[in-house]
Image (cartoon, rainbow, N blue to C red):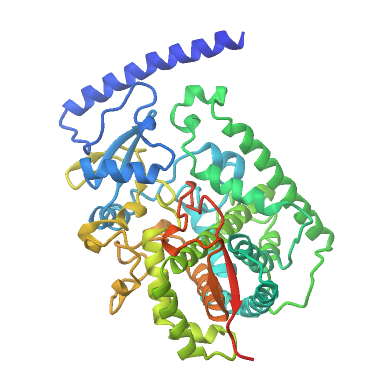
Amino acid sequence: MSYTIALFLVLLGTLCSFIYFFRTLTTNKNDRKLPPGPAPLPIIGNLHMLGKLPHQSLHHLAKKFGPIMSINLGYVPTIVVSSPEAVELFLKVHDIVFAGRPKLQTSDYITFGAKGMAFTQYGSYWRTVRKWCILHLLSASKVESFAPVRKAEMVSLVESVRTMAAKGETLNLSQQVGKVVEVIMSRVIFGRCFDDEIEFRPLIEETMYLAGVFNLSDYVPFLAPLDLQGIKTRLKRIGNGLHAFFEKLIDEHERGSKNIEEQKSYTDFFHVMVSLLNRPMNPNEENPYIIGRENIKAIMVDMVAASFDTTTTSIEWTLSELLRHPRVMAGLQQELETVVGRNRMVEESDLPKLTYLDMVIKESFRLHPVAPLLVPHESTEDITVNGYVIPKMSRILVNTWSMGRDHNVWSDNAEEFIPERFEDSSIDLRGHHFQLIPFGSGRRGCPGMQLGLTNMRLIIAQLVHCFDWELPDAILPNELDMTEKFGITLPRANHLVAKPTFRLVG
């Protein structure tokens, strides 16, 4: 019976596919000039062209078809944008039209029907949730209030690495960085650490991977019941794990047994969000939306996933590039010695003076953007951009990875890691300069940039200032493996390991 159903679905899909492509062909003849792009196959469109690293495959295709390129991902018309000028049209000039989000199977299971912030449709619900997240977690004043948490964890980090250095041990930097980011953000978001009481981080890592996978069920809906990639099964497992985790925390909160480890100088984000439970979102509306548990859980998943994985990945790549380029490492250590000295750790008050560190981080973001294709946008109406028709409900992929390697913007040495290219440059990371938008731009730009950058700058500065680093097994800097692993973020395929030597005096 299952074979018969599968065969029927395939035949039905084939028929629908030919109807779809016939209609597309007819429509395009009626003066609808779509952006150029490769010819699609029936049913799957151009999905077969994405490969294991879609951002790289799309980069090479854009060289042939241009910075505004049209492809079909299954039945979904998709526009790939890969130049600063083109991105400005989509995320600034016509930002309101492209502020939508596509409906994805991932958001159904992981954020309980897209009830968080990242994948929620543009509108009043999204605006209110975004306002809450900024006010209670991401604003400048809130970020500053978390400084004691960061300072305590920096002391712990340095002592831990110093102990390993004294033993002459090699350190898994990926794990160490991931742990310190997790602890900082757990204390900030939940007011506590979870230690090993629950396998929480693996759930988040799997979430970020599945959020970036090109899921056949999203693009060829009639194949969704077959779950050919096994993604739905994995999503259910992750969704159940996150559901159980947050249900337990909400229950504890309602019983008044939050197990707070210390007297905090701030109110953690989870406490604030749970205090809104069963309350109207906008009380002045005639029929206000009532905040339920699924809303709270979805918002928490978004905040945790964004803060854990993106910061860790960015630090990993920056340290990798520093290890590959001893000249840059020496230059950064020299700046730190000048500003901080060799007899103490880096303080947050030192960060604004570390201009070379900022150049290093910008260059790292250029070559290793936080999200190589950003979070996908969706057009909310038919629109013409640069002479091309963009149909309603088209998916928009912004290839920031490709933009960072654009020779027209960054010269012939675009593939090289040279922080000095940002010396005396006005380019910042706030989404105003479209050459470099690792946090996106416009209405759907990431509001957590300041919190992420503060953690990132402090951890990198601390590790580089307090320790010298040597690659293990006599690996030469230019031999360091820099293979990428695709997801909604772009982590290293293999962990970064190095041998530390404590370098402070006293």
State the residue at coordinates (60%, 54%).
Answer: 299
**x and y percent of residue 97 in the render?**
33, 48
Residue 355 in which image quadrant: bottom left
**x and y percent of residue 385 in the render?**
22, 46
**Residue 437 visible, this angle:** yes
State the residue at coordinates (60%, 65%).
Answer: 177
In-front residue for pair 230/320: 320
> In the displayed structure, does residue 440 sit left or right of residue 210?
left
**x and y percent of residue 306 in the render?**
55, 57
Of all residues, the one furthest to the front in this rendering is: 474
Q: Quadrant for the C terminus, please.
A: bottom right
Residue 65 in which image quadrant: top left
Residue 381 in which image quadrant: top left
Q: In this view, does 314 lie above or below 350?
A: above
State the residue at coordinates (35%, 33%).
Answer: 49
State the residue at coordinates (80%, 54%).
Answer: 251
**Residue 380 visible, this angle:** no
Q: Quadrant for the N terminus, please.
A: top right
